[in-house]
Image (cartoon, grey):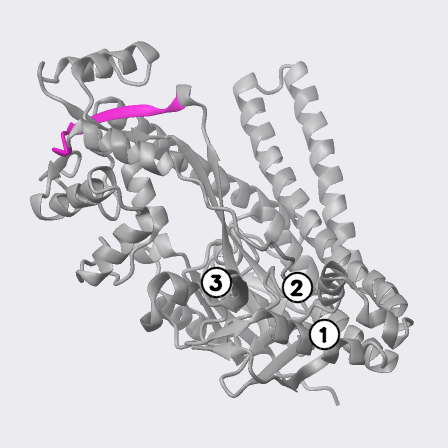
Amino acid sequence: MPSTTKRAILYSRVSTQEQASSGYSLAQQIEALRVYAASEGYEILEEITDPGQSGASLERPGMDQVRDLVAAGGVSVVLAQDRDRFAREPAYHYLLKREFEERGTKIRALNDRGDESPEGELTDGILDQLAKFERAKTAERTRRGKLRKVREGKVLAGPAPDFGFQYNASRDGYEVDEADMGRVRDIFRLVAVEENTLHAVKRALENAGVRTPKGKEFWSTIYLRERILDDVYKPHTIEEVNALVEEGLMTPEVASRLETGLCYGIWWYNRRRIVHKQVSEKGPGGRRYRRTTKTESKPRSEWIAVPVLDAGIPREWVNAARHTVLSHRQTSKRGRRFWELSGGLLRCPGCERAMTSATTVQGERLWNYYRCPKRAAHGTRSCPQKKTLRAEPLETSVWQSVSGLLTDPERLRVGLEELIAQEQSTLHGDPRKQTEALANMLENVVSKRRRYQDMAAEGLIGFDELRSRLAELDDVRRTTEQELESLRRRGDRIAELEHDGIIMEQYAGLVPTELKSLAPQERHRVYRLLRLQVIPGQDGNVEMSGVIGAADSICQSQTMSG
């Protein structure tokens, strides 16, 4: 007889913001779910948490684990304390529900209002949309409150003020922190007066044991450049401040409170739009997650200028330092060559960074080698990899191994099938059914939009309500289209692997003499097709992985130098 045991997965999630505000607790959520599971007679299969993860995306480590367990079968229900713990977007909640139903698994939250009837699903759907609408209204009120505050000439307090400043007692303005501002002035002096490069300034700060504002040991030239170009350190005269008023970037009321004859720095607000997103991808060691950040500059007309106390840096220093960093051009490299293992193919064994290329000149001879960028930037203490790799012998050895692989078509086929299987494992559920469900949702959005417009035309709803409902539908449409695009990209990656397999067969058909004559650019293309990853070892061996299957080791001598 089939087992009647009801098995449940308990899922809890808390975002970074929620953790900071203590609005939710992972332990509290799990405890509430345990009590409910016991009362309903569920056997707890797994307790899965997603700490610091946003509900605006399904790309979460814990949620991926839940979906994998459900796909394996035998799960009766996935429980969460609130519906928005699964996802904040109704479209994502709908997608999970359909995916789990195909495996005979229900998705339940302790705050579900309806039952499994069509009327109950409608009730939950409406309340989900209302909750989303309330979150959007809260976000809009917060945004308007911030705009009102900065237009009054107040600074918005973040995790930390600009380097060299500290917040005042009310945390809406800046005061000069003389200890740190002295270091900022040193940076400007080193660049403007002593004519040092940013890299030389970075080294000087590190050698002197000066810590970054976050307490780190190593400085970044990018950070130093941003400080030099930041208007918060540039002294602006009252005439320059009034020019900002004329541009509409500062209110006259704020400018009228400033003292004539003094200079002020400018703290800018609303200059950029920053979007953070987390994506998962399949790697040699399994699924890994990385956060992406997209930054867009807003039109200058939307910027808001807030005057702050003068940093005390001479104007001529600021101008000279800015001229230096803005006019800096990277010197051209002598002996230009094509680096076969560039573009992330070669990885540092110490920190897994993509190794970069470098060229040195000794007399009339050029020496080409690969090195760890982290060690090159921050010294030997930042990465245990203490060796550089001579380019020519390393590239020759790697190609000898790969060209030998190309004469083994069966091994190529097996390796390619393994990569395709890994990529397919990132898909949860049936992609065709998911695509069909999302396409139906898009059709439903179009149908609802038309009905709302007809209702407005007949006077059944007002235009304010129409705009609100259309905005909600637009949010659902965007989310659904994003998920469809994600499914399409994953399908494209699988199709690309299959297509690359056909191209690889053409290379495998070349005779050894033709393989030897391939140009560096062609060799690089072969490596890309093979999804090659090369990791050198301290013992002189080099590990390779990709379509070749399990990691191969080739013996490589005399490629490393101190």
Does 62 appear above or below 266? Answer: below
Residue of label 3: 363
* Residue 153 can be seen, yes or no: yes
Magenta stretch in the rendered image: 302-313
Instruction: Decide which of tag 2 and tag 3 comes sooner along the chain.
Output: 2
Front residue (pair 8, 157): 157
Residue of label 1: 399
Mark 2 residue element? loop
- Estimate the spatial distance between the alpha carbons at disc 1 and disc 2, rounded to whole Å: 9 Å
Q: Residue drawn 57% across and 48% down?
A: 124
Mark 1 residue element? helix
- Estimate the spatial distance between the alpha carbons at disc 2 and disc 3, rounded to whole Å: 25 Å
Residue of label 2: 340
Question: What's under tag 2, amino acid-wise?
Answer: Glu
Quarter of the image with the N terminus in it: bottom right
Front residue (pair 278, 295): 295
